[in-house]
DNA sequence: ACCACTTACATACGCGGCGTATGTCCTAGT
DNA sequence: ACTAGGACATACGCCGCGTATGTAAGTGGT
């Protein structure tokens, strides 16, 4: 039966990814010995090289898995919010808070980019950025935010979030720093709104022309 | 003469830093062989371990040097601008553009954080963030920007810039992407202004109370 | 059902890099 | 001048990675 075979292989891959994820997330990519964590999964480096080519390939697989999980979580957060704008803001805040989780921070925001380069440029395009982009696109067509290139904005927000998370995590008082960061982040996002609450601005400021241009720059 | 001795030592340190900077900036930290680049400087690993303890120590020294240069450049940019706000914006744009330089990008934004953790938390506190913070503080006391924690804002901007730079550098069309990123970045910063050009907002929005609170959170 | 071939791993080997321990020379203080 | 300590170089061992090779099990054709 061929199913059996495929399942075994998938299980082996999964075990390797899980073991690597554990190791990368705790001691870090560079310090994680392939011999060690493959042995922890009851395998050897032979299996690793067979399935993933090299250590980097395995890291990439781990990143894809985590990225998918993060994207799903973000989508749930934004979907649960009462309004689209609030959904977006909560999505961003959730992004910061996810970046506080040691495993995500270490793998996605430290070792990942360092080893693989800019992940969002990879075949496995960063789902989180796509999610943020889509939220921004909808907000812009609604005229809820200023005319801004969504992908650019998503990437800027992404960068700000991840750095904020790094800062918070390394801070002496993580809770306090986190509060400051989230507050500041909300303030920054507020600047993107057309109908913001900071002062008496004309609500019609985001005029019809806002939907006219596409972000495709020829 | 004791000066001679000290000068020789300083020169050795400088040679090591320069060689390491070259190597780290091109092939990257992990791929840079200590034997290779110390030999390139006419020295051996012995000198390196003597002066910097280990490879990480040398990286830290390289980072401090680059950071100082960047800070100086940023200060010149902001000082040359006609207004304080414009100076700040140009400072941020310059920051993005510096992050496009391969050496800065690789060492300061990729390998540095990956190897040393969040650099801005280190004894050699990141000068660029301090510079941005100071600019923001002044703008806030002038009432030119909304009430926001300057350090938080500086760090968010810092994160956004560095990620933008990574994105640009890995892009297919760096010039076009750079233009998009800078435009988007300006739009994001515009959101921080109290007296912005997006709509008729009361210019007195930044009232005297803005200068009342210190960023020291007790 | 048998055989040729491939797949999925494990084992074995070599190399390069890092850290440390040790050695040597040279300078500076007395 | 003599000595102690600093500034390096040299030597050694270990570990981790990548590759080449081995092996058992599975798969497809006839």
Image (cartoon, coloured by chain):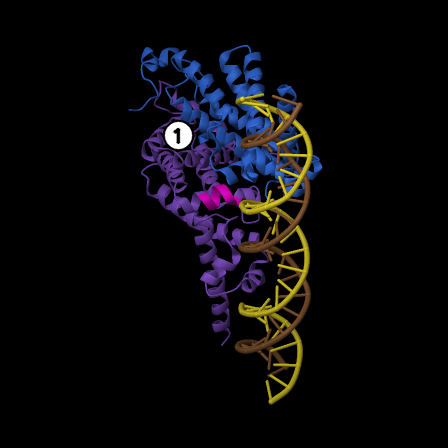
Chain colours: A blue, B purple, C brown, D yellow
Query: If the image is split into quadrants, where does the N terminus of chain A sit?
Result: top right
Instruction: Farthest residue to the left: give it.
Output: A218
Q: Main secondary structure of the magenta part?
A: helix
The quarter of the rendered structure image containing the C terminus of chain A is top left
Mark 1 element type? helix
The magenta stretch is B106-112
Residue A148 visible to the viewer: yes
Q: Is residue A98 above or below residue B151?
A: above
Q: x and y percent of residue A195 in the render? A: 43, 14
Q: Which residue is mark 1?
A: B185
Q: Quadrant of residue A78?
A: top right
Q: Is residue A176 visible?
A: no
Q: Looking at the picture, how far across and down is residue B81, in whole percent? A: 33, 39
**Which residue is located at x 54 percent, y 20 percent?**
A91
Q: Determine if the magenta segment contains residue B110.
A: yes
Foreground: B80 or A116? A116
Q: Magenta span has B36?
A: no
Q: Position of residue B84 (x, y in %)?
A: 37, 36
- Which residue is at a point 39% across and 40% down the rendered structure image? B100
- Image quadrant assignment for residue B168: top left
């Amino acid at each position: 039966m061929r199913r059996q075979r495929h399942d075994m292989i998938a299980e082996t891959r999964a075990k390797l990814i899980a073991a690597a994820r554990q190791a990368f997330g705790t001691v870090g990519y560079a310090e994680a010995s392939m011999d060690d964590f493959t042995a922890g999964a009851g395998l050897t480096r032979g299996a690793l090289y067979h399935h993933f080519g090299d250590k980097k390939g395995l890291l990439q697989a781990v990143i894809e898995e985590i990225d998918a999980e993060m994207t799903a979580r973000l989508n749930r957060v934004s979907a649960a919010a009462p309004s689209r704008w609030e959904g977006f803001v909560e999505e961003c805040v959730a992004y910061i808070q996810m970046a506080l989780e040691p495993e995500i921070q270490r793998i996605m925001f430290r070792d990942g980019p360092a080893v693989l380069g800019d992940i969002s440029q990879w075949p496995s395009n960063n789902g989180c950025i796509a999610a943020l982009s889509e939220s921004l696109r909808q907000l812009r067509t609604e005229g809820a935010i200023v005319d801004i290139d969504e992908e650019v904005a998503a990437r800027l927000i992404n960068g700000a979030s991840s750095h904020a998370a790094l800062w918070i995590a390394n801070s002496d008082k993580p809770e306090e720093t986190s509060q400051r960061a989230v507050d500041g982040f909300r303030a920054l996002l507020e600047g993107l709104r057309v109908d913001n609450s900071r002062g008496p601005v004309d609500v019609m400021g985001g005029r019809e022309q806002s939907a006219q241009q596409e972000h495709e720059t020829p």
